[in-house]
Image: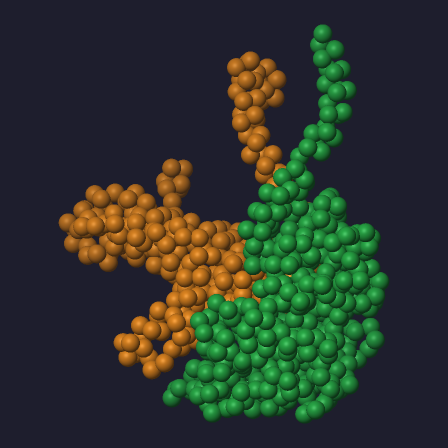
Amino acid sequence: MAAITRLGASPLERHKRVSFYIFLAPWLLGFLLLQVVPIAWGFVISLTNRSAFPVEIKFVGLKNYITLFKDTEVLSSYWVSFVYTVANTLIGVVTGFIFALLLDRELPGRGFFRTILYFPYMIPLVAVGWIFRIFLERDTGFLNILLVRLGLLSTGVPWMQQSPMGSILLLSFWQAGWSMIIFLGALSTVPRELYEVATIDGAGYGRRMRHIMLPLISPFIFFQLVMSFIYAMQAFIQPYIMNPRVIRGNWVMLNPPPNDIFFVMSRAYYIISGQHKFAYGMAMLWVLFAFVLVLTILFVKFGGFWVYTEADEKR
Amino acid sequence: MKILRRLLITIVLPLLLPVMGHAAPATVKFMSSDADLPAAFVEKFNKENPDKITIVRTEPDYTKMIAEAASGNASDLINIGEGSDLAYYVPRGLFKDITSYLQKSKVLKMSDIDLLGNVNYQFDGKDFGKGPWYGLTKDYNNIGAITYNKEMFKAAGIPFLSETVPITYDEMYALAKKLTKKDGSGKVTTWGYDIGTGWWKFLASDMAYMSGLNVFKDADKSIMNDDPKMSKIWKYFAQMFVDGVVPNVKNPAPSWAGANFQSDRVAIVQLGYWFGAQLRSNPGFEKKYGWAPTPVLVKGGPRVTNTLGATGVVMYAKTRVPDQAFKVFEWYIGGDYGRERATTGWGIPALKSLEPLLPEANAYDKSRKMIALDDAKYFKPWQTSGWTTAPAWDPIWTKNAEALVKGEITMDKFVDNWYSGLNKLFADGKAELGR
């Protein structure tokens, strides 16, 4: 029946369909040519011995993938990325949520503080990295100068060298502005009457938060957790900019950071560009893609039991 | 009428295209830092060649270069950090043989090329200094030459170094230790010595020559020489990190050796002649800094120094504008800019005829020039392997040196890891070429 309807579509209907596809075409074309084809091509390359300057390209099957799972340094990169992702996600979501709670109130200067807290998110990550690099420097960094002047330290501490991961995670606080905006939006969707009713019934702030606010904004929290996870697993530039080793001008990307912060994307980039092993680097990226995909699916499928939804009620 | 118009377009347009193409100036992309290719000179060149060639400087990003080369679209001229990397890139077909251009050139005469400094730009697929030419150095340096801070020497009661008689590496180590200052908490405030990132391999090569050793075990240069005498040389540099006479992971410096020296954090560096030009930006540089020749292993023993392969310019193999690119190359090496660079003393020029232009108006310039030309008599190309690039050596060292300083591995383990890491790199490079 549906097929007959399609065949017998009116000129207006056909016009609508053609228009739809014409409007969709530029994006679809771009998506196919600039996303799908390179990604698929990357997979094909990962099955070969392709280097930057190949003499003879051979199909090697899953050899790169097998090597990868025996490569302790590469495996450590996946682990380091995962650890960073968990910490970064928690910092981003919790900090953003606290900021949002504070700024959801009717306070003087609320707009100003919202702007100030969101502002760091607008600064490119590379610049933020350099700001922190200078901020944390042992002898000339503001943090050490301040702590020494306050008498909290007797001498400057090489923070980046002593705690490379901690230094990078500081950047996560700066990026909490994004989470804050999402949560401010989320909080605005909670009907005020519910709070009023609960207050009349004697519920304190904690109970109102636990029984009204958190359930109602749980879809937003879930969204933030999933998106932060996906983005953080793909963190790339932070280890290069916050590299505790000496970095110099144009050699930044050729100077790999220590294993403690050598994220999987950063290492794959180094393997591709610094060591010229295209195929091996592509295999690393495909494993990362599979890892993120599987974890996201599992998270969405099994991790969402606490997320409030009206779907059941509607059904 | 319609057919006639189409016919005209079909026939006339293709005929016009070459003429139109001819009228447009050819663009030569030149990958170089602004310091090595200043905008003012590019502007001048472009103004003087409005209808023929336009130089467009591209940022020196070697990872980008790899990506561009992989897609067949790298810059036409490339400023390459170490000429010795030609041994890696030439077998991979990245650079163009420019021998025929050099033979015909009226600006760059073959007889004028300083063979000593340009040795790494001539490569026959196996050895340097033989076979086709792929480029020329922009200038070269005696990278082992010492620059020291006279004020720090004075404060420590150490006499200034001789400009003619080299000290030994052991003497330099002792000086570095004496000049390293710590505060009450053990934090190093001034380091006695600092080494350019990765330069240990260049200096170790000199020391190996002086000891009659080879860095590699085999003629193929694919296995590191694990002879205890060679290991001792590597340990010399590793020990510097352990002793903290150079910045290390426990006592890091804010920048690289040259900048640390310029900011009075370091007393001695081995960077070479070019660094003298860099120091001109420091007030009182003429009196503040002293120069000494590249150290030796044994007093009165053999002298060796190298150029680290010398930074220079090569032509991309797939350039679409080789003739124009060579014109720019000529201008860069031997033209206005080449001459200007020689007069500022950033390095010994690639052409012998430009050498008299090196500055020597004051004692400072005279001293560093005299030392550079004296050291140059003892140049030997650093012992590199064509199975990998020079920068690829460094992460292996850095990673293990950090573990050594932290006490996670022993010195012997450090050397083992250094050898095995490099051997793996060489094996990968061989496999890449199917050998």
Residue A188 in the image: state x and y as whole percent: 28, 44
| Residue B113, picture quadrant | bottom right
Q: Colour of chain A?
A: orange
> For the point 73% across and 79% down, which residue is it?
B378
Quick one: which chain is green?
B
Residue B310 lies in quadrant: bottom right
Give how far across and how far down residue B150 sits, in percent: 49, 83
Residue B199, how many percent across, how many down? 63, 75
Horizontal arrangement in the rendering, residue A162 relative to residue B7 (left or right): left
Q: Residue at x 63, y 63 (%)?
A: B342
**Near-viewer residue (A30 or B193):** B193
Residue toward you, B262 or A98: B262
Q: Is residue B323 visible?
A: yes
Residue B163 in the figure: left or right of residue B224? left
Question: Which residue sits at x=44%, y=71%?
Answer: B283
Task: Name above or below for residue B398 compared with residue B298.
Answer: above
Quadrant, the N terminus of chain A: top right
Position above or below: A220 against B24: below
Does residue B264 appear left or right of residue A42 in this picture?
left
